[in-house]
Amino acid sequence: MADVAAHAAQHHAPPQGFIRKHVFSLDHKVIGKQYYALALVAVFVGMVLSWIMRLHLGWTNLAIPGLHFLSKNGAPGDIMTPEYYLQLMTMHGTIMVFFVLTTAPFAAFGNFFLPIQVGAEDMPFPRFNMMSFWVTFVAFLVLISSFFVGDGPTLGGWTQYAPLMQWARLGVPGRASAWCFGQLLSRSSA
Amino acid sequence: MAKFFAVTIIMIAIASAIPVLRHTWPAPEDISVHGHLIDEQMSETMAEAGISFLAAQFILAIFIWKFSNRPKDAKIRKFPGGAKGLVIAALLLVGTEVLALGIFGTRAWASVYFTPPSADAIPIQVQAGQFAFYFRYPGPDGKFGPLHPSLINEANENFFGLDQTNDQDSKDDIATAQMAIPVNREIHLLMHAKDVGHSFYVPELRVQQDFVPGLDLSIHFTATKIGKYEIVCTQLCGLGHYNMKAYLYVYSQADFDDWLKKQAALQ
């Protein structure tokens, strides 16, 4: 009797509804694919940043269309200042390390393959796992939002060592707060 | 399709191993006494990682070749011992590799960081600031005078903030923009940062140490070959970081003494 009850409790009915199946899924394979999609988006953003950095290294006074809208003081007339170069470099490093290099192998591949490799049904805490992904996603959005606030992101490098990250600012102080908050979210979800 | 994938994996694995085995990109020439320990550790790590990598790729390719496109009723073969056996095997294999590398690496690390400099090491102070390195030699009295940050004045070339009028020990200190050391003599490098984080890196010496503002750090090394080497800053320090460097000259003892005399005359 107890066996049957325990067995029934373990095997839930498959999820219904689009949201439960594809958005807030508890299945480790879906979560792994979601992390992989996030890593792909992040790697393209990081790649575009590296292109812009390389353009600046090759043609220092090139006017890159649209840069003026992102940062009035960092790229006046669409021409990148050295400060803005460091800001782009910081974000390239941060995005690549935290949202591609840790997300793709550990979160994406790990979530997908590890339970299969050890013969488990799923990860131990499926709801935490699902929430972790969405917190990482929000962290990514917070980090990207720093491009659109004030004069752009912090310029202290992806290691953000003090005192450089405190002193080296462009425009509005507290530049690093979006970066820090994004980090807080992403690292607590990792 | 699966067989093509297996072959591709093996080809990529071999292609990535070839440049390493052929030493296509060798490290810069080692001119330090402790450098060979670091290079050996690097080689051992590369060998261990390389063998594990090739083995893993070959096994993966073999499994894909043999076991893909099997009929649905084919017998499922399990790892001996099941999942538990697999986990124990992985723990033992990976654990041994990592522990071995760590234990062998302690020798290299301890010889550099846990060994104090010898008593007759030449003390040289280096100050890293945005965006230059400056060096100070203690002069004939062998003592460094105190530093007064409020007296730092780039225009007057008082980079360290020395009070050469009132501080006796500062009077014979020699401040330079280049670093010169005698060959085969141990150097005790005393490091501090003036403003933000920097790093002292000489690839040939196998020496790299970050400057942390507020900390007085030191490293020691012995150069074994005469020549001119580049000291580069390898920690982002601001807009001029890309350009921040100094030169290290390793001279014979006689040439070094000459150099130091010339620098003292320029103070």
Image (cartoon, coloured by chain):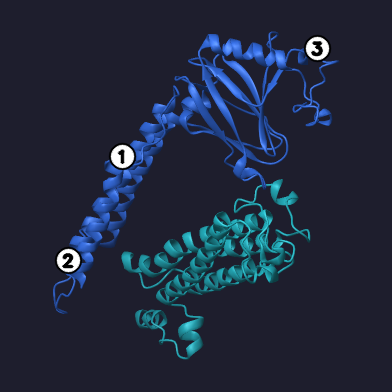
* Residue type pointed to by label 3: Gln
Q: Which residue corresponds to the image point at 56% horizontal and 18% vertical from the top-left?
A: B181
**For the residues carrying marks 2 and 3, which lies nearer the camera in this image?**
3
Q: Which residue is mark 2?
A: B65
Q: Is residue B22 visible?
A: yes
Mark 1 belongs to chain = B
- As helix, strand or loop, the secondary structure at mark 1 comes to loop
Q: Which chain is blue?
A: B
Percent x, y for residue A91? 60, 60
| Residue identified by numbered label 1 | B23
First reached walking from the N terminus: tag 2 or tag 3: 2
Quarter of image, res B234: top right
Relative to A169, residue B31 above or below:
above
Dividing the picture into quadrants, the one containing residue B199 is top right
Q: Earlier in the sequence, mark 3 or mark 1?
A: 1
Check chain identity for marks 2 and 3: say if they share one.
yes
Q: Colour of chain A?
A: cyan
Amino acid type of the residue that numbered disc 1 sits on in the rendered structure: His
Residue under label 3, please give it: B168
Q: CA distance from mark 3 to mark 1?
A: 54 Å
Q: Is residue A125 above or below residue B187?
A: below
Which amino acid type corresponds to the residue marked 2 in the rendered image?
Trp
Residue A68 horizontal side relative to residue B158, left or right: left
